[in-house]
Image (cartoon, rainbow, N blue to C red):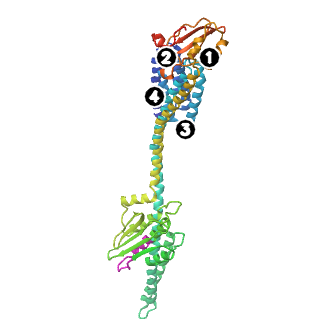
Amino acid sequence: MRRGRRLVMDVALWLGLCGWVTIDAGSSTKHWELLFGLTATTAAIAVSRRYPLVSLIIAMLASFIVLGSFGGRVPIWEGFLLVAVSYLAGYRQPVAKPMLRVFTVISVIAVPVALLWSEDGFSAWGALLGILVFASVTPWLLGRYIRQREDMARDGWRRAEEMESRQRLIADRARLRERARIASDMHDSLGHELSLIAVRAAALEVAGGLDERQRQAAGELRQSAATATERLREIIGVLREEDAPTEPVDESIDELLDRARASGMLIESSVDAPVDGEPGMVDRAAYRVVQESMTNVVKHAPGAAVTVRVVRSAGQTDVVVTNAPPPAGPLPGRSSGRRGLIGLRERVRLVGGTLRAAPSGGGFEVSATLPHDAAPSEESPESQAAMDAEVGQSTSARELERARRDVRRSLIQAIVVPIGLFGLVVGISGVVFLVQWYGSELPRGAYERIRVGQTRAEIAPVLPGGQRIARPRMVEPPVPAGAICEYYGTERTVFNLNYEVYRLCFADGKLVAKDVISEDEQRGNPDDPGGAGR
Protein backbone atom coordinates (compact mmCIF):
# COMPACT_ATOMS: atom_id res chain seq x y z
CA MET A 1 0.00 0.00 0.00
CA ARG A 2 2.73 2.43 0.98
CA ARG A 3 4.84 1.46 -2.03
CA GLY A 4 1.89 2.01 -4.35
CA ARG A 5 1.26 5.46 -2.86
CA ARG A 6 4.90 6.38 -3.46
CA LEU A 7 4.68 5.21 -7.06
CA VAL A 8 1.57 7.30 -7.64
CA MET A 9 3.29 10.38 -6.18
CA ASP A 10 6.37 9.87 -8.38
CA VAL A 11 4.27 9.40 -11.51
CA ALA A 12 2.22 12.52 -10.70
CA LEU A 13 5.40 14.55 -10.21
CA TRP A 14 6.89 13.20 -13.44
CA LEU A 15 3.75 14.02 -15.42
CA GLY A 16 3.62 17.54 -13.99
CA LEU A 17 7.27 18.26 -14.82
CA CYS A 18 6.96 16.73 -18.29
CA GLY A 19 3.94 18.97 -18.84
CA TRP A 20 6.03 22.02 -18.05
CA VAL A 21 8.78 20.80 -20.36
CA THR A 22 6.29 20.28 -23.18
CA ILE A 23 4.67 23.70 -22.73
CA ASP A 24 7.92 25.63 -22.32
CA ALA A 25 10.35 23.80 -24.56
CA GLY A 26 7.68 23.12 -27.16
CA SER A 27 7.49 26.85 -27.89
CA SER A 28 11.23 27.07 -28.41
CA THR A 29 12.83 27.09 -31.83
CA LYS A 30 15.38 24.61 -30.51
CA HIS A 31 13.50 21.38 -31.04
CA TRP A 32 16.21 19.31 -29.43
CA GLU A 33 15.45 21.10 -26.13
CA LEU A 34 12.11 19.30 -25.84
CA LEU A 35 13.71 15.85 -26.22
CA PHE A 36 16.54 16.82 -23.89
CA GLY A 37 14.15 18.14 -21.24
CA LEU A 38 11.89 15.08 -21.30
CA THR A 39 14.89 12.74 -21.09
CA ALA A 40 16.50 14.62 -18.18
CA THR A 41 13.19 14.85 -16.30
CA THR A 42 12.43 11.16 -16.73
CA ALA A 43 15.91 10.08 -15.63
CA ALA A 44 15.95 12.41 -12.61
CA ILE A 45 12.56 11.30 -11.30
CA ALA A 46 13.24 7.61 -12.00
CA VAL A 47 16.25 7.50 -9.65
CA SER A 48 15.12 10.15 -7.17
CA ARG A 49 14.07 7.70 -4.43
CA ARG A 50 16.88 5.17 -4.54
CA TYR A 51 19.69 7.49 -5.65
CA PRO A 52 18.72 11.06 -4.69
CA LEU A 53 22.24 12.37 -5.24
CA VAL A 54 22.35 10.97 -8.78
CA SER A 55 18.97 12.55 -9.46
CA LEU A 56 20.33 15.88 -8.24
CA ILE A 57 23.41 15.60 -10.47
CA ILE A 58 21.19 14.93 -13.52
CA ALA A 59 19.04 17.99 -12.79
CA MET A 60 22.08 20.20 -12.23
CA LEU A 61 23.76 19.06 -15.44
CA ALA A 62 20.49 19.67 -17.27
CA SER A 63 20.65 23.27 -16.04
CA PHE A 64 23.59 23.82 -18.42
CA ILE A 65 20.93 24.47 -21.05
CA VAL A 66 20.67 27.92 -19.49
CA LEU A 67 24.13 28.67 -20.91
CA GLY A 68 22.72 28.38 -24.39
CA SER A 69 19.63 30.47 -23.64
CA PHE A 70 20.87 33.30 -21.45
CA GLY A 71 20.25 36.61 -23.13
CA GLY A 72 17.27 35.19 -24.90
CA ARG A 73 14.56 32.78 -23.71
CA VAL A 74 15.36 31.26 -20.32
CA PRO A 75 14.00 27.67 -20.02
CA ILE A 76 11.50 27.76 -17.17
CA TRP A 77 11.11 23.98 -17.10
CA GLU A 78 14.67 23.60 -15.86
CA GLY A 79 13.89 25.76 -12.83
CA PHE A 80 10.90 23.60 -11.90
CA LEU A 81 12.93 20.41 -12.35
CA LEU A 82 15.75 21.74 -10.16
CA VAL A 83 13.39 22.87 -7.42
CA ALA A 84 11.55 19.54 -7.26
CA VAL A 85 14.61 17.28 -7.46
CA SER A 86 16.69 19.39 -5.06
CA TYR A 87 13.94 19.42 -2.45
CA LEU A 88 13.55 15.65 -2.67
CA ALA A 89 17.33 15.15 -2.46
CA GLY A 90 17.52 17.31 0.67
CA TYR A 91 14.57 15.46 2.18
CA ARG A 92 15.80 11.96 1.37
CA GLN A 93 19.55 12.33 1.90
CA PRO A 94 20.50 13.86 5.25
CA VAL A 95 24.26 13.99 4.61
CA ALA A 96 25.26 17.44 3.40
CA LYS A 97 28.83 16.92 2.18
CA PRO A 98 27.96 15.11 -1.10
CA MET A 99 25.62 17.94 -2.05
CA LEU A 100 28.29 20.56 -1.38
CA ARG A 101 30.82 18.62 -3.43
CA VAL A 102 28.39 18.27 -6.35
CA PHE A 103 27.52 21.96 -6.27
CA THR A 104 31.20 22.98 -6.20
CA VAL A 105 32.24 20.63 -9.00
CA ILE A 106 29.38 21.61 -11.30
CA SER A 107 29.98 25.31 -10.65
CA VAL A 108 33.66 24.92 -11.56
CA ILE A 109 32.91 22.82 -14.65
CA ALA A 110 30.40 25.43 -15.80
CA VAL A 111 33.13 28.10 -16.17
CA PRO A 112 34.94 26.67 -19.22
CA VAL A 113 31.63 25.43 -20.67
CA ALA A 114 30.16 28.93 -20.41
CA LEU A 115 33.21 30.56 -21.97
CA LEU A 116 33.39 28.08 -24.86
CA TRP A 117 29.71 27.44 -25.57
CA SER A 118 27.68 30.44 -24.49
CA GLU A 119 27.67 33.63 -26.48
CA ASP A 120 27.49 35.60 -23.23
CA GLY A 121 30.52 33.92 -21.69
CA PHE A 122 31.13 34.72 -18.05
CA SER A 123 27.79 36.49 -17.69
CA ALA A 124 26.04 33.25 -18.60
CA TRP A 125 28.03 31.44 -15.92
CA GLY A 126 26.84 33.98 -13.37
CA ALA A 127 23.25 33.43 -14.47
CA LEU A 128 23.67 29.65 -14.22
CA LEU A 129 25.19 29.95 -10.77
CA GLY A 130 22.34 32.16 -9.63
CA ILE A 131 19.83 29.60 -10.86
CA LEU A 132 21.69 26.82 -9.06
CA VAL A 133 21.71 28.79 -5.82
CA PHE A 134 18.02 29.66 -5.78
CA ALA A 135 16.53 26.69 -7.64
CA SER A 136 18.83 24.02 -6.20
CA VAL A 137 20.57 24.97 -2.96
CA THR A 138 17.58 26.71 -1.41
CA PRO A 139 15.08 23.87 -2.03
CA TRP A 140 17.72 21.35 -0.90
CA LEU A 141 18.14 23.18 2.39
CA LEU A 142 14.38 23.41 2.77
CA GLY A 143 14.02 19.66 2.23
CA ARG A 144 16.77 19.04 4.75
CA TYR A 145 14.95 21.26 7.25
CA ILE A 146 11.65 19.41 6.77
CA ARG A 147 13.41 16.08 7.23
CA GLN A 148 15.04 17.21 10.46
CA ARG A 149 11.70 18.39 11.78
CA GLU A 150 10.13 15.03 11.04
CA ASP A 151 13.10 13.20 12.57
CA MET A 152 12.70 15.23 15.72
CA ALA A 153 8.98 14.52 15.88
CA ARG A 154 9.48 10.81 15.21
CA ASP A 155 12.64 10.03 17.17
CA GLY A 156 13.08 12.89 19.60
CA TRP A 157 10.17 12.03 21.85
CA ARG A 158 11.00 8.32 21.74
CA ARG A 159 14.52 9.10 22.90
CA ALA A 160 13.14 11.39 25.60
CA GLU A 161 10.78 8.66 26.80
CA GLU A 162 13.65 6.20 27.02
CA MET A 163 15.64 8.68 29.06
CA GLU A 164 12.65 9.35 31.30
CA SER A 165 12.23 5.61 31.85
CA ARG A 166 15.90 5.31 32.80
CA GLN A 167 15.59 8.23 35.17
CA ARG A 168 12.51 6.70 36.77
CA LEU A 169 14.51 3.55 37.40
CA ILE A 170 17.16 5.64 39.13
CA ALA A 171 14.49 7.31 41.25
CA ASP A 172 12.93 3.95 42.14
CA ARG A 173 16.32 2.62 43.14
CA ALA A 174 16.93 5.61 45.37
CA ARG A 175 13.51 5.16 47.00
CA LEU A 176 14.14 1.44 47.58
CA ARG A 177 17.51 2.24 49.11
CA GLU A 178 15.88 4.64 51.51
CA ARG A 179 13.25 2.06 52.38
CA ALA A 180 16.03 -0.41 53.08
CA ARG A 181 17.60 2.10 55.46
CA ILE A 182 14.21 2.55 57.11
CA ALA A 183 13.97 -1.22 57.45
CA SER A 184 17.44 -1.22 59.00
CA ASP A 185 16.35 1.38 61.52
CA MET A 186 13.24 -0.67 62.30
CA HIS A 187 15.41 -3.74 62.78
CA ASP A 188 17.56 -1.93 65.30
CA SER A 189 14.56 -0.82 67.36
CA LEU A 190 12.32 -3.84 66.84
CA GLY A 191 15.18 -6.24 67.46
CA HIS A 192 15.84 -4.50 70.75
CA GLU A 193 12.19 -4.89 71.77
CA LEU A 194 12.15 -8.56 70.80
CA SER A 195 15.31 -9.12 72.80
CA LEU A 196 13.64 -7.60 75.86
CA ILE A 197 10.66 -9.92 75.36
CA ALA A 198 13.03 -12.91 75.22
CA VAL A 199 14.81 -11.79 78.43
CA ARG A 200 11.53 -11.35 80.29
CA ALA A 201 10.29 -14.73 79.08
CA ALA A 202 13.50 -16.33 80.30
CA ALA A 203 12.98 -14.69 83.69
CA LEU A 204 9.45 -16.08 83.86
CA GLU A 205 10.75 -19.49 82.93
CA VAL A 206 12.98 -19.68 86.03
CA ALA A 207 10.72 -17.71 88.38
CA GLY A 208 9.18 -19.52 91.34
CA GLY A 209 5.45 -20.12 91.84
CA LEU A 210 4.78 -21.36 88.32
CA ASP A 211 3.66 -24.82 87.42
CA GLU A 212 5.25 -26.92 84.71
CA ARG A 213 2.73 -25.87 82.05
CA GLN A 214 3.35 -22.17 82.70
CA ARG A 215 7.11 -22.71 82.60
CA GLN A 216 6.72 -24.51 79.28
CA ALA A 217 4.66 -21.60 77.88
CA ALA A 218 7.30 -19.09 79.03
CA GLY A 219 10.01 -21.19 77.38
CA GLU A 220 8.07 -21.33 74.16
CA LEU A 221 7.59 -17.54 74.32
CA ARG A 222 11.33 -17.08 74.82
CA GLN A 223 12.10 -19.41 71.93
CA SER A 224 9.59 -17.65 69.65
CA ALA A 225 11.07 -14.24 70.47
CA ALA A 226 14.59 -15.50 69.71
CA THR A 227 13.39 -17.10 66.46
CA ALA A 228 11.59 -13.89 65.44
CA THR A 229 14.74 -11.88 66.15
CA GLU A 230 16.78 -14.25 63.99
CA ARG A 231 14.24 -14.14 61.16
CA LEU A 232 14.11 -10.35 61.37
CA ARG A 233 17.89 -10.17 61.09
CA GLU A 234 17.86 -12.44 58.04
CA ILE A 235 15.12 -10.46 56.28
CA ILE A 236 16.62 -7.07 56.99
CA GLY A 237 20.03 -8.41 56.03
CA VAL A 238 18.74 -8.93 52.50
CA LEU A 239 17.53 -5.32 52.36
CA ARG A 240 20.68 -3.78 53.86
CA GLU A 241 23.12 -2.14 51.50
CA GLU A 242 26.47 -3.80 51.06
CA ASP A 243 28.26 -0.87 52.66
CA ALA A 244 28.03 -0.69 56.41
CA PRO A 245 26.34 2.43 57.82
CA THR A 246 28.83 5.18 58.57
CA GLU A 247 26.76 6.93 61.23
CA PRO A 248 26.47 5.49 64.74
CA VAL A 249 23.26 3.59 65.49
CA ASP A 250 20.65 5.65 67.38
CA GLU A 251 22.76 8.79 67.09
CA SER A 252 20.81 11.93 67.98
CA ILE A 253 20.63 15.12 65.94
CA ASP A 254 22.75 16.97 68.54
CA GLU A 255 25.44 14.31 68.31
CA LEU A 256 25.35 14.54 64.52
CA LEU A 257 25.81 18.31 64.68
CA ASP A 258 28.66 17.97 67.18
CA ARG A 259 30.49 15.62 64.84
CA ALA A 260 29.92 18.07 61.94
CA ARG A 261 31.27 20.98 64.00
CA ALA A 262 34.32 18.91 64.91
CA SER A 263 35.02 18.52 61.20
CA GLY A 264 35.10 22.33 60.76
CA MET A 265 31.57 23.21 59.67
CA LEU A 266 30.06 26.49 60.89
CA ILE A 267 26.70 25.49 62.37
CA GLU A 268 24.14 27.48 64.31
CA SER A 269 21.50 25.14 65.71
CA SER A 270 18.32 25.14 67.70
CA VAL A 271 17.15 21.58 68.40
CA ASP A 272 14.22 20.84 70.70
CA ALA A 273 14.41 17.79 72.90
CA PRO A 274 12.25 14.76 71.92
CA VAL A 275 8.70 14.97 73.23
CA ASP A 276 6.55 12.21 74.61
CA GLY A 277 4.61 10.39 71.96
CA GLU A 278 6.97 11.19 69.11
CA PRO A 279 7.25 8.01 67.00
CA GLY A 280 10.69 6.59 66.40
CA MET A 281 10.15 6.74 62.64
CA VAL A 282 9.55 10.48 62.87
CA ASP A 283 12.69 10.96 64.96
CA ARG A 284 14.79 9.01 62.45
CA ALA A 285 13.20 10.93 59.56
CA ALA A 286 14.16 14.23 61.23
CA TYR A 287 17.68 12.88 61.72
CA ARG A 288 17.91 11.90 58.05
CA VAL A 289 16.72 15.34 56.90
CA VAL A 290 19.47 17.01 58.90
CA GLN A 291 22.06 14.42 57.88
CA GLU A 292 21.34 14.64 54.14
CA SER A 293 21.19 18.44 54.26
CA MET A 294 24.60 18.58 55.94
CA THR A 295 25.99 16.18 53.34
CA ASN A 296 24.71 18.39 50.51
CA VAL A 297 26.28 21.47 52.11
CA VAL A 298 29.66 19.76 52.24
CA LYS A 299 29.33 18.67 48.59
CA HIS A 300 27.90 21.77 46.97
CA ALA A 301 28.54 24.72 49.32
CA PRO A 302 31.86 24.07 51.08
CA GLY A 303 32.62 26.54 53.86
CA ALA A 304 29.08 27.92 53.96
CA ALA A 305 27.49 28.69 57.32
CA VAL A 306 24.55 26.42 58.22
CA THR A 307 21.49 27.06 60.35
CA VAL A 308 19.58 24.07 61.74
CA ARG A 309 16.20 24.38 63.45
CA VAL A 310 14.28 21.40 64.80
CA VAL A 311 10.97 22.33 66.45
CA ARG A 312 9.04 19.56 68.17
CA SER A 313 5.45 19.87 69.35
CA ALA A 314 2.84 17.42 70.52
CA GLY A 315 1.51 16.82 67.01
CA GLN A 316 4.43 17.27 64.60
CA THR A 317 8.13 17.92 64.15
CA ASP A 318 9.41 20.67 61.87
CA VAL A 319 12.96 20.60 60.50
CA VAL A 320 14.58 23.48 58.60
CA VAL A 321 18.20 23.43 57.39
CA THR A 322 19.48 26.53 55.58
CA ASN A 323 22.94 27.23 54.25
CA ALA A 324 24.40 30.55 53.14
CA PRO A 325 26.16 30.97 49.77
CA PRO A 326 29.59 29.27 49.68
CA PRO A 327 32.37 31.84 50.13
CA ALA A 328 34.56 30.32 47.41
CA GLY A 329 31.82 29.07 45.12
CA PRO A 330 30.75 25.46 44.50
CA LEU A 331 33.31 22.74 44.02
CA PRO A 332 34.19 21.96 40.38
CA GLY A 333 33.25 18.59 38.94
CA ARG A 334 30.14 16.69 38.09
CA SER A 335 26.81 17.97 39.27
CA SER A 336 24.83 16.08 41.86
CA GLY A 337 22.63 13.19 40.87
CA ARG A 338 20.14 14.34 43.59
CA ARG A 339 19.62 10.75 44.68
CA GLY A 340 19.92 11.82 48.31
CA LEU A 341 16.96 14.16 48.00
CA ILE A 342 14.96 11.44 46.24
CA GLY A 343 15.55 9.04 49.14
CA LEU A 344 14.89 11.78 51.64
CA ARG A 345 11.60 12.63 50.00
CA GLU A 346 10.63 8.94 50.18
CA ARG A 347 11.57 8.78 53.88
CA VAL A 348 9.42 11.83 54.66
CA ARG A 349 6.51 10.53 52.56
CA LEU A 350 6.45 7.24 54.44
CA VAL A 351 5.79 9.07 57.73
CA GLY A 352 3.04 11.17 56.09
CA GLY A 353 5.15 14.34 55.92
CA THR A 354 6.13 16.85 53.26
CA LEU A 355 9.59 17.93 52.10
CA ARG A 356 10.59 21.14 50.37
CA ALA A 357 14.02 21.82 48.87
CA ALA A 358 14.76 25.03 46.97
CA PRO A 359 17.32 27.85 46.64
CA SER A 360 16.97 30.57 49.26
CA GLY A 361 18.85 33.87 49.52
CA GLY A 362 21.74 32.71 47.39
CA GLY A 363 22.02 29.48 49.37
CA PHE A 364 19.75 26.48 49.76
CA GLU A 365 17.02 25.47 52.18
CA VAL A 366 15.59 22.06 53.04
CA SER A 367 12.50 21.95 55.22
CA ALA A 368 10.33 19.06 56.34
CA THR A 369 7.05 18.82 58.22
CA LEU A 370 6.71 15.46 60.01
CA PRO A 371 3.34 14.70 61.64
CA HIS A 372 3.36 12.26 64.57
CA ASP A 373 0.22 10.32 63.77
CA ALA A 374 -0.11 10.38 59.94
CA ALA A 375 -0.13 7.44 57.57
CA PRO A 376 2.20 7.28 54.57
CA SER A 377 0.99 9.75 51.96
CA GLU A 378 0.37 8.87 48.34
CA GLU A 379 2.63 10.22 45.62
CA SER A 380 0.93 13.34 44.31
CA PRO A 381 1.54 14.72 40.81
CA GLU A 382 3.33 17.67 42.42
CA SER A 383 5.69 15.47 44.39
CA GLN A 384 6.30 13.30 41.33
CA ALA A 385 7.08 16.38 39.26
CA ALA A 386 9.49 17.58 41.93
CA MET A 387 11.13 14.17 41.98
CA ASP A 388 11.40 14.18 38.20
CA ALA A 389 13.11 17.55 38.36
CA GLU A 390 15.51 16.29 41.01
CA VAL A 391 16.39 13.12 39.14
CA GLY A 392 17.16 15.11 36.04
CA GLN A 393 14.12 15.37 33.82
CA SER A 394 15.87 18.38 32.37
CA THR A 395 18.23 15.95 30.64
CA SER A 396 15.52 14.89 28.22
CA ALA A 397 14.40 18.51 27.97
CA ARG A 398 17.95 19.43 26.99
CA GLU A 399 17.92 16.71 24.34
CA LEU A 400 14.66 18.04 22.98
CA GLU A 401 16.03 21.57 23.01
CA ARG A 402 19.14 20.38 21.17
CA ALA A 403 16.96 18.78 18.48
CA ARG A 404 14.93 21.98 18.20
CA ARG A 405 18.16 23.96 17.91
CA ASP A 406 19.25 21.75 15.03
CA VAL A 407 15.94 22.31 13.27
CA ARG A 408 16.12 26.06 13.82
CA ARG A 409 19.71 26.06 12.57
CA SER A 410 18.62 24.17 9.46
CA LEU A 411 15.86 26.71 8.83
CA ILE A 412 18.32 29.58 9.25
CA GLN A 413 20.70 27.84 6.84
CA ALA A 414 17.87 27.50 4.32
CA ILE A 415 17.53 31.28 4.42
CA VAL A 416 21.06 32.55 5.05
CA VAL A 417 23.10 30.13 2.91
CA PRO A 418 21.38 30.97 -0.40
CA ILE A 419 21.63 34.67 0.36
CA GLY A 420 25.30 34.24 1.27
CA LEU A 421 26.01 32.18 -1.85
CA PHE A 422 24.16 34.69 -3.99
CA GLY A 423 26.19 37.48 -2.43
CA LEU A 424 29.37 35.51 -3.09
CA VAL A 425 28.38 34.89 -6.70
CA VAL A 426 27.52 38.55 -7.19
CA GLY A 427 30.77 39.60 -5.52
CA ILE A 428 32.96 37.30 -7.59
CA SER A 429 31.09 38.11 -10.77
CA GLY A 430 31.34 41.81 -10.01
CA VAL A 431 35.08 41.68 -9.40
CA VAL A 432 35.70 39.64 -12.55
CA PHE A 433 33.39 41.95 -14.52
CA LEU A 434 35.21 45.09 -13.36
CA VAL A 435 38.63 43.59 -14.05
CA GLN A 436 37.52 42.52 -17.50
CA TRP A 437 35.72 45.84 -18.11
CA TYR A 438 38.69 48.06 -17.40
CA GLY A 439 41.20 45.59 -18.85
CA SER A 440 39.49 45.70 -22.24
CA GLU A 441 39.14 49.48 -22.56
CA LEU A 442 40.48 51.07 -25.75
CA PRO A 443 41.08 54.82 -25.40
CA ARG A 444 39.07 56.97 -27.80
CA GLY A 445 42.16 58.69 -29.12
CA ALA A 446 43.81 55.37 -29.93
CA TYR A 447 40.65 54.17 -31.66
CA GLU A 448 40.51 57.31 -33.82
CA ARG A 449 44.17 56.89 -34.87
CA ILE A 450 43.49 53.37 -36.12
CA ARG A 451 43.01 53.28 -39.92
CA VAL A 452 41.41 50.65 -42.10
CA GLY A 453 44.15 48.83 -44.01
CA GLN A 454 46.65 48.73 -41.16
CA THR A 455 48.02 45.34 -40.20
CA ARG A 456 47.19 43.63 -36.91
CA ALA A 457 50.82 43.90 -35.87
CA GLU A 458 50.82 47.70 -36.38
CA ILE A 459 47.67 48.11 -34.29
CA ALA A 460 48.61 45.62 -31.54
CA PRO A 461 50.64 48.10 -29.39
CA VAL A 462 47.59 50.31 -28.76
CA LEU A 463 45.12 47.48 -28.12
CA PRO A 464 44.29 46.41 -24.53
CA GLY A 465 45.21 42.96 -23.24
CA GLY A 466 41.69 41.50 -23.35
CA GLN A 467 38.48 41.88 -25.29
CA ARG A 468 35.16 43.17 -23.98
CA ILE A 469 32.60 40.44 -23.15
CA ALA A 470 29.65 42.67 -22.25
CA ARG A 471 28.20 44.21 -25.40
CA PRO A 472 25.00 46.09 -26.34
CA ARG A 473 21.88 43.99 -26.95
CA MET A 474 21.42 45.00 -30.58
CA VAL A 475 21.94 43.76 -34.10
CA GLU A 476 25.51 44.37 -35.21
CA PRO A 477 26.49 45.62 -38.64
CA PRO A 478 27.28 42.77 -41.04
CA VAL A 479 30.70 41.19 -40.59
CA PRO A 480 32.88 41.51 -43.74
CA ALA A 481 33.34 38.25 -45.59
CA GLY A 482 36.19 36.17 -44.22
CA ALA A 483 36.85 38.61 -41.38
CA ILE A 484 37.29 37.90 -37.65
CA CYS A 485 36.08 40.67 -35.35
CA GLU A 486 37.46 41.78 -32.01
CA TYR A 487 35.59 43.86 -29.45
CA TYR A 488 37.05 46.48 -27.13
CA GLY A 489 35.43 48.77 -24.60
CA THR A 490 35.02 52.51 -24.89
CA GLU A 491 35.76 55.00 -22.13
CA ARG A 492 32.19 54.99 -20.86
CA THR A 493 31.88 54.17 -17.14
CA VAL A 494 30.44 50.92 -15.90
CA PHE A 495 27.54 52.82 -14.34
CA ASN A 496 26.30 53.92 -17.78
CA LEU A 497 24.84 50.45 -18.45
CA ASN A 498 25.21 51.11 -22.19
CA TYR A 499 27.75 48.49 -23.09
CA GLU A 500 29.01 50.20 -26.27
CA VAL A 501 32.10 48.67 -27.81
CA TYR A 502 34.58 49.26 -30.61
CA ARG A 503 34.52 46.46 -33.16
CA LEU A 504 37.65 45.83 -35.22
CA CYS A 505 37.39 43.25 -38.00
CA PHE A 506 40.53 41.71 -39.50
CA ALA A 507 40.94 39.68 -42.67
CA ASP A 508 44.28 38.22 -43.74
CA GLY A 509 45.98 40.12 -40.94
CA LYS A 510 44.68 43.55 -42.02
CA LEU A 511 41.94 45.78 -40.58
CA VAL A 512 39.01 45.76 -42.98
CA ALA A 513 36.33 47.45 -40.84
CA LYS A 514 35.98 49.45 -37.61
CA ASP A 515 32.65 50.22 -35.98
CA VAL A 516 31.20 51.67 -32.80
CA ILE A 517 28.37 49.40 -31.63
CA SER A 518 26.10 51.34 -29.30
CA GLU A 519 22.45 51.45 -28.36
CA ASP A 520 22.69 55.24 -28.42
CA GLU A 521 23.99 55.03 -31.99
CA GLN A 522 21.05 52.87 -33.00
CA ARG A 523 18.59 55.34 -31.44
CA GLY A 524 20.38 58.24 -33.10
CA ASN A 525 21.56 59.87 -29.85
CA PRO A 526 23.37 63.10 -30.82
CA ASP A 527 25.42 63.00 -27.61
CA ASP A 528 27.09 59.73 -28.57
CA PRO A 529 30.83 60.34 -28.94
CA GLY A 530 31.29 57.61 -31.56
CA GLY A 531 29.69 56.74 -34.80
CA ALA A 532 29.11 53.53 -36.63
CA GLY A 533 31.69 52.81 -39.26
CA ARG A 534 34.18 55.30 -37.99
Callout 1 secondary element: loop
Over which residues does the magenta segment extend? 271-290
How far apart in space, not on screen, are marks 3 and 2 (Cα)? 37 Å
Residue 433 coordinates in the image, percent (x, y): 55, 24
Callout 2 secondary element: loop
Q: What's the amino acid at mark 1?
A: Leu
Badge 3 or badge 2: first in the primary sequence: 2
Label 1 vs label 3, nearer the camera: 1
User: Could you tell me if residue 345 is visible in this image?
Assistant: no
How far apart in space, not on screen, are marks 4 and 1 (Cα)? 63 Å
In what quadrant of the picture does the C terminus appear? top right
The residue labelled by disc 2 is: 72
Callout 3 secondary element: loop
Q: Looking at the image, which is closer to me, 225 or 309? A: 309
Left or right, 488 with respect to 1, comes to: right
User: Could you tell me if residue 21 is visible in this image?
Assistant: yes
How far apart in space, not on screen, are marks 4 and 2 (Cα)? 36 Å
Q: Please determine whether, in this image, residue 65 is positioned above or below residue 299.
A: above
Badge 1 or badge 3: first in the primary sequence: 3
Badge 2 or badge 1: first in the primary sequence: 2
Q: What's the amino acid at mark 2?
A: Gly
Callout 4 secondary element: helix
Mark number displayed over residue 8: 4
Q: Please determine whether, in this image, residue 505 is positioned above or below residue 125.
A: above
The residue labelled by disc 1 is: 463
Neighbour tally class for label 3: few under 14, some 14-19, many 20 plus, Cα within 10 Å: few
